[in-house]
Amino acid sequence: MGFKLIPTLVSLSLALFIWFFIPVPEGVSPNAWLLFAMFLGVISAIIGKAMPIGAISIIAISLVAITRVTADNPSDAIKDALSGFANPLIWLIGISIMISKGLQKTGLGSRLGYYFIAVWGKRTIGIGYSLALSELILAPVTPSNTARGGGIIHPIVRSIATSFDSDPEKGTEGKIGKYLSLVNYHSNPISSAMFITATAPNPLVVDLIAKATDSQIHLSWTTWALAMFLPGVVALALMPVILYLLYPPEIKKTPNAAAFAQERLKEMGPISLHEMIMLVVFGLLLLLWAGIPAMLLGDLWTLDPTTTAFIGLSLLLLTGVLTWEDVLTQKSAWDTVTWFAALVMMATFLNKLGLITWFSGLLQTGIGQLGLSWIPACLLLLMAYMYAHYIFASTTAHITAMFSAFYIAGIAVGAPPMLFALMMAAASSIMMTLTHYATGTSPIIFGSGYTTLAEWWKAGFVMSVANMTIFIVLGGVWWKFLGYW
């Protein structure tokens, strides 16, 4: 069978139960309720991993077209079902994942990591900061946080830990490996919160905010990066210290780490032509995404972020840094485009058919009955949204299922739309700190065995509180200074 029987039966039963046994609520159309039933079935299948998320998405597209919940005409129904593929944000992430392949293929990502360790690696905490800085530098052009934290940074962590004989199989993980693996992981959610292109679901957040506000708020790459810069940098600066206090490594001084990194750099040899090209393209992408040419030379040089991503990939193909075969074999990129298109499409039509407005109204009514002012009411919504991630194994599924309703409810109880949008956007990445199944990076790093389950969950909860405090308090002040609210 191409599916897991029990999760599939649970998902199918949930959808059928909602459609056949729960009366359509007052104020909701039958088509909206049917789409909602299918939507929850899809989310349940994703959570239960009934099939790969791309395969589930293909089935979701088929169901929307077959049931004609968006249009009576069959031709219009399939156009609606496929409409998500026309969303530029989907292609921004897909193409950016393809570009990030160049960091791994050329070895530039590893070279940057070893370089920072060679400079700051004389103490264990210095290695921690080197890992965090490497994450920060790679984040803008690595929208697969799994590839960044698990594919580029984690092998470096394991190499360093092994060099100090810190091995879970020997019971010596406490020497240095536990601390470094936790820093490796907790750098990932913070860096993911800092750029639209740092993790795949971020453009989904942008899209949902725009739809919820009738495009009055449409976060650009620059606006997001500027907003998240100060709280993100402070969170990255404090995180290695918090984890150092929480789980202090047995080895505090690491004079050999710098020598180890220098040895690895020596083995890699001088920087290659392809690494230089990758570095130049990296810089060009950042300049164009930040809108620097347009600021200096005028609106003629303004480019859509997705156009910029296509330029970057084109340059890598023209110079031979990447081949078309490399692009074709980037399964995660094509998979992301597929599931993103399906989930964005379903979320869009749930909104158009009025279901999101109805559900957010229920939330607003429930919060209103508590008699809270907008600040505690919005904090309650924010915390409920973020800590619900304990029951999700996919940030995408979580954001698709809950973001719009909670965001609209927050605005309804009086939150400034831009302020609450940025808080919700930050929470959508910070929630990845919580569990060992929270995102694709977590099972890779947790699976290396350096921490116990209890240690991982404790660190996750502590860091979630610390990070969200920074983003809410310092972020709120910073965004006020920027004039965002």
Image: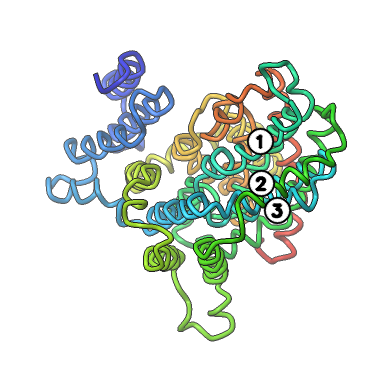
Q: Quadrant of the C terminus?
A: bottom right
The type of residue carrying mark 1 is: Ser
User: CA gap, disc 1 to disc 3?
Assistant: 14 Å
Kind of element beneath mark 2 = helix
Question: Residue 382's x, y, as percent?
Answer: 63, 39
Q: Which residue is mark 2?
A: 264
The type of residue carrying mark 3 is: Tyr
User: CA gap, disc 2 to disc 1?
Assistant: 10 Å
Is 416 drawn above or below residue 312 in the view shown? above
Mark nearer the viewer, 2 or 1: 2
Is 358 drawn above or below residue 478 in the view shown? above
Residue beneath the point at 27% across and 35% down: 60
Task: Give whichever of discs 1 and 3 has the lower sequence position.
Answer: 3
Residue beneath the point at 60% across and 37% down: 155
Proximity of marks 2 and 1: CB atoms separated by less than 8 Å? yes
Numbered tag placed on residue 159 in the rendering? 1
Kind of element beneath mark 1 = helix
